[in-house]
Amino acid sequence: MPDQRHKSFVAAVERRIGWDDAIERALAYAEDAEPNGKNLPTSIDVARRAVEMGSDRDTVVATLLSARGLRPRLDPERIEQEFGHTVAELTRGVIRLNTLKEGGHARIDSPEQAEKLRRLLMAIISDARVMLIKLCYRVERLRLVRHDDFDTRRLIAQETLDIYAPLANRLGMGLLKWELEDLAFRVLEPQVYKRIAKLLEEKRSEREIFIEDFTGRLRRLLAEQDVDADVQGRAKHIVSIWRKMQRKQLEFHELFDVRAVRVLVGSVADCYAALGVVHTTWQHIPKEFDDYIANPKDNGYQSLHTAVVTDDGKVVEVQIRSREMHDKSELGVASHWRYKEGGRLDQRMENSIAQMRDLLQGSAADVSDAMSEISTELSSDRVYVFTPKGQVIDIPRGGTPLDFAYSIHSEVGHRCRGAKVNGRIVNLTAELHTGDEVEILTTKESRPSRDWMNKNLGFIKSASARSKVRNWFNHQDFEQNLLDGKAIYDRTLAKFSLHGVNLKALAAHFKRTEVEQFFADIGRGLITPAQILGFLQAEPQQDPFRKVKKTPQAPASKDQVTIQGVGNLMTQFGRCCKPVPGDEIIGFITVNSGITIHRRDCSNILSLPESKRQRLIEVDWGQRPDSVYPVEISLTAYQRTGLMQDVSTILANLKVNLLNINSNTNRDEQMVYTRLTVEIHGVDDLVSIIDKLSQVPNVQDVKRVA
């Protein structure tokens, strides 16, 4: 036998949407998943609330199927099979929002924290209707919160005022905002709530009847004067009254806007015509009149405000504005929510909220496309993650646990040795996503790794975090930095087969007068291997070649190399050194095969007899960014299962074409010696490949084959 809850829901659906098979099947599931305890609403209660908010069929079905008790046996894949893709996506979104601990983020210590959490909630949903379901659930949850213990009641109520009521306001859900605030305020300030309720001296329904009579009369009077107007009214709810009493330091009897009416007209002239009708019909209170049309507020807000006394002695506040002023006030730079909340302007958030309102009102032509655009708007450059205590931290998109750690505090970053994301241990290079809960695992002593400063390794995304690591090394012992820097320098030269470097000239380029200071600054991270490599490629330290006077450079050629500024000559690349763009190169004129291109530090070029040096010629790289070049890499590693699979995965992720692989295993030493031939566009690609392969477990050495 259906209970009253069931009957109420069915009646609401039949009245507003129309009954169908999908709703009936979803209702059957919902009835079989009643929550345990008196403090949790059923999905039927929430769905009825969603129906009353004007939701469509898919939203109602998804609300019914989002019951916690259904999750173990009704996953989104099965929902998609039975109810379609849209319902499944809505259900996924609700489940994702519900993974956030209820009341766990209520201790918000600043407006910025509250705003970050609101942004997080907006960013992790894929459809505006998900937020509608969440807000409907929160209203019903507050109605039952009296069954919870004292601390839980207050946490949930405070979270509602900080997060969910402002979101309802921004999305234009005035009814939900009104209920959320009143219900939460009743929990947090029960005595104040009762006192104001008593001072109102009338029931809410009676106040609403009064407003309806007032607006009806005003609507008729305006029509008689040929003023096309929309007249709307509502009795002020208790939270709004209390806030105004606090903000203006007024007693209840000094308030003139307990009852409020808004008049929307077509033009500025109509605004003043409507004002004349109001002041002619009722006695106005002069000190409560404000002309924000002639004198707009600093934020651009425009409207006429007045207060009048009705025949039975009740005061009514009247706001009059044009529809254009109203749109600007509600949706633009003078929006009502920012005035109320004291927030800052964020155009991206503004645009997203406007689109979400359109979706909820059914005015967006394509929900999928619109939500895709909203998602991009909200999350293009930042992600929002939680600390274990519920604090929201925003980091750059693509950020890692180390970015998160350094955002909390420099010392947390310095001591970081691992991280848990949503309870599972992850690599420090793992990319964080909005909604993740991150716990940093630390040691007692600060000891960052120099690898964290290497952009190619992906440990840190933000420049500020990388700077904090660099500064840490700057303050360490000179002797240790000297040793570390020398080791980094030697590895860099060995990896890229660089020889004959003039060390003093290199140090002088970086404005270091002493070689030891040069090495120490490498150890501190002030000079990076990439900077060293870039200088050595641009300015070779040995020049055993004859100087050839260059002719004026010809127009840009599409050849791979240009010969003394001239293109379209037959060239080939030396197999001995395999030069790639970024290498300093030289040409050797052969007898029958045109010009062979070598690296300047190629052993064959360096050992040329004097009689053949006259055949060397200056060459430059041409302009063919789409060209690829083969390069050979040597990799040495301890043998283990899956080693080659990991290497292949790295190359695939870097979108590198593997031409050849030759691997030999020394079973006595348990070592694997591998030669890889890959195609690259230039030295920058080579640097990334070597850096990434060096991080593969068990790999001992990676370098370019000379």
Image: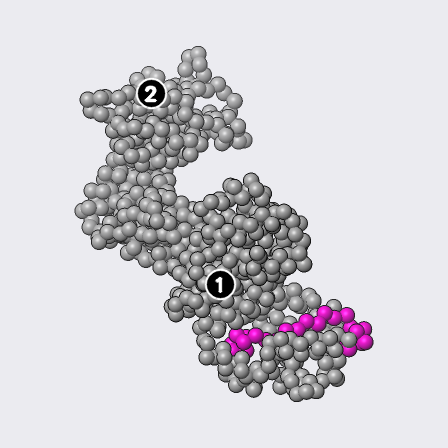
Residue occupying image coordinates x 35% and y 31% = 646
Does the magenta segment cover residue 223?
A: yes
Which quarter of the rendering shows the N terminus? Answer: bottom right
The image shows residue 262 at horizontal and vertical percentages of: 67, 73
Task: Place residue 429 in its image quadrant.
Answer: top left
* Residue behind mark 1: 141
| The one of 384 and 436 positioned closer to us in this rendering | 436
The image shows residue 616 at horizontal and vertical percentages of: 38, 21
* Kind of residue at badge 2: Asn
The answer to whether 655 is drawn above or below residue 230 in the figure is above
Task: Place residue 668 in its image quadrant.
Answer: top left
In the shown orientation, is residue 33 left or right of residue 455?
right
Q: Which residues are magenta?
A: 221-244
The image shows residue 142 at horizontal and vertical percentages of: 49, 66
| Residues packed near mark 2 inside 10 Å, few (<14), some (14 to 19) or many (20 plus) | few
Evaluate if marks 2 and 1 touch, with contact meaning CB atoms under 8 Å apart: no
